[in-house]
């Protein structure tokens, strides 16, 4: 596949992935594109179909998965989530760097495809900091917080696995983390800029 390589971003909830992505999109909005994930959960207030997620029925999604239409998918809290090939191709067709925000299971699944993305893991400075950040959001119950922290602990362990990620960014200082992310993507950004100007 020609054009810039996609980017797979992974990391526990609260590590700061979305903040980093927001900055990237603000600075290079015309170069990056989000692959919109599919989910079987109900939309939250303010979420739009096709923008935040493609909200689909479980039957429809299972049918597409069985037909090989998904690069990765996972079940989380009783709902299916996944990245369809079509969603990634739609971004690449615009000559943009496709950004996929996936969990570790997703990363492992993408490794089995021919996508060849750049794998980046965003890690909190510590699990204590992560817990503070999640508590500040005020969206978690004690039970969901405990679940997220357990998942984060497992994530941080796995990211040490040899060859799983091209880069691990420890998001202790947002500016430094952002610079590291931009440097890791500089080649692809240049590629996308060349093609968008030509």
Image (cartoon, grey):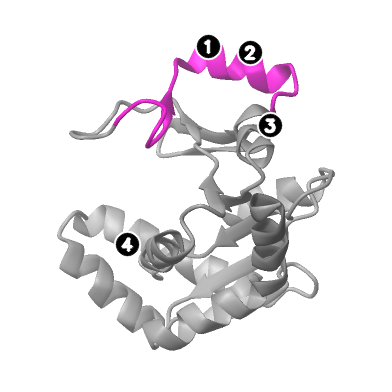
Look at the numbered disc 4 and give the secondary structure of its residue. Answer: helix
Dividing the image into 4 quarters, which one contains the N terminus? top right
User: Foreground mark, 4 or 2?
Assistant: 2
State the mark number for residue 38.
none
Residue 177 vs residue 142, the one in the foreground:
177
From what the image shows, is residue 51 above or below residue 130? above
Q: Is disc 1 surrounded by few (<14), some (14 to 19) or many (20+) residues within 10 Å?
A: few
Which residues, given as a range, are shown in magenta?
48-71
Residue at x-position 47% and y-position 78%:
178
Residue 3 vs residue 34, the one in the foreground:
3
First in residue order: circle 4 vs circle 2: 2
Residue on which disc 2 sits? 63
Look at the numbered disc 2 and give the secondary structure of its residue. Answer: helix
In this rendering, does residue 101 appear at all? Answer: no
Residue on which disc 4 sits? 146
Mark 3 and mark 2: span between their CA atoms? 14 Å
Q: Position of residue 41 (x, y in %)?
A: 36, 28
Residue on which disc 1 sits? 59
Residue at x-position 49% and y-position 71%:
153
User: Foreground mark, 3 or 1?
Assistant: 3
Mark 3 and mark 1: span between their CA atoms? 18 Å
Mark 4 and mark 3: span between their CA atoms? 33 Å
């Amino acid at each position: 596949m020609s054009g810039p390589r996609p980017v797979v971003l992974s990391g526990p909830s609260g590590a700061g992935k979305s903040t980093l992505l927001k900055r990237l999109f603000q600075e290079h909005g015309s170069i990056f594109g989000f692959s919109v994930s599919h989910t079987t959960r109900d939309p939250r207030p303010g979420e739009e179909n096709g923008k935040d997620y493609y909200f689909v029925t479980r039957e429809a999604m299972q049918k597409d998965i069985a037909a090989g239409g998904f690069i990765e998918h996972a079940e989380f809290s009783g709902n299916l989530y996944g990245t369809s090939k079509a969603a990634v191709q739609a971004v690449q067709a615009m000559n943009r760097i496709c950004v996929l925000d996936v969990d570790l299971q997703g990363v492992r699944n993408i490794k089995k495809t021919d996508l060849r993305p750049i794998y980046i893991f965003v890690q909190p400075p510590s699990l204590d900091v992560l817990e503070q950040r999640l508590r500040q959001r005020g969206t978690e119950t004690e039970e969901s917080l405990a679940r997220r922290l357990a998942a984060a602990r497992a994530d941080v362990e796995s990211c040490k696995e040899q060859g799983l990620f091209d880069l691990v960014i420890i998001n202790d200082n947002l500016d430094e983390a952002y610079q590291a992310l931009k440097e890791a993507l500089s080649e692809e950004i240049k590629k996308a800029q060349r093609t968008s100007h030509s």
